[in-house]
Amino acid sequence: MSLTRADVEKIARLARLKLDENEQAAMLGELNSVFAMVEKMCGTDTGGIEPMTHPHDLALRLREDRITETDHAAEYQACAPEVRNRLYIVPQVIEE
């Protein structure tokens, strides 16, 4: 997969970034190199390799599952512009 300059412009607009021509060219090169690396990794044969959660054998330290704090959600959300059902409401930035 290879991105075009139009793709970089769209990503920058969605991320609310203003990139000049030189920055767009640099970003295009960097993003394409990342996608090239991912494509190369996808071609690696991983058959017979057991999935792991961590590269090292670690014992998880477990603790008692108990409530240690009181609920501060209302206090934290008091300064938010809009909250519904304890969720922060933010403007839509991705077009449909």
Image (spheres, grey):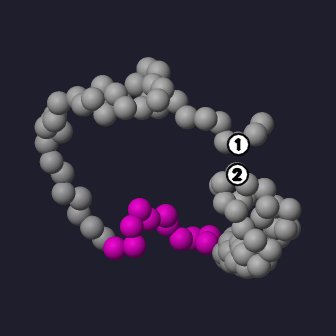
Which region is colored magenta? 45-56
Q: Kindly report the secondary structure that dominates the magenta region of the rendered protein.
A: loop
Q: Disc 2 on helix, strand or loop?
A: helix
Q: Is residue 62 left or right of residue 24?
A: left
Question: What residue is shown with label 1?
Answer: 94
Residue at the (18%, 57%) spot, across then down: 61
Q: Is residue 32 visible in this depiction of the protein? A: no
Position of the C terminus, as image quadrant, is: top right
Q: Earlier in the sequence, mark 2 or mark 1?
A: 2
At label 1, the amino acid type is: Ile
Residue at the (65%, 36%) spot, across then down: 92
Q: Disc 1 on helix, strand or loop?
A: loop
Position of the N terminus, as image quadrant, is: bottom right
Residue at the (46%, 29%) spot, across then down: 81
Question: What residue is shown with label 2?
Answer: 14
Q: Residue 32 at what x, y percent from top left?
A: 75, 74
Answer whether residue 6 is magenta in the image. Answer: no
Q: Is residue 17 above or below residue 29?
A: above
Q: Are marks 2 and 1 in contact (CB under 8 Å)?
A: yes
Q: Is residue 66 above or below residue 27?
A: above
Q: Residue 80 at what x, y percent from top left?
A: 42, 32
Q: Is residue 96 above or below residue 44?
A: above
Residue at the (72%, 67%) spot, across then down: 19
Which of the pair 11/3 is nearer the observer? 11
At label 2, the amino acid type is: Leu
Q: Gap between marks 2 and 1, in whole Å?
A: 7 Å
Label 2 crowd (10 A; few <14 / some 14-19 / many >=20): few
Q: Residue 27 at what x, y percent from top left?
A: 72, 74
Q: Residue 54 at what x, y percent from top left?
A: 39, 67
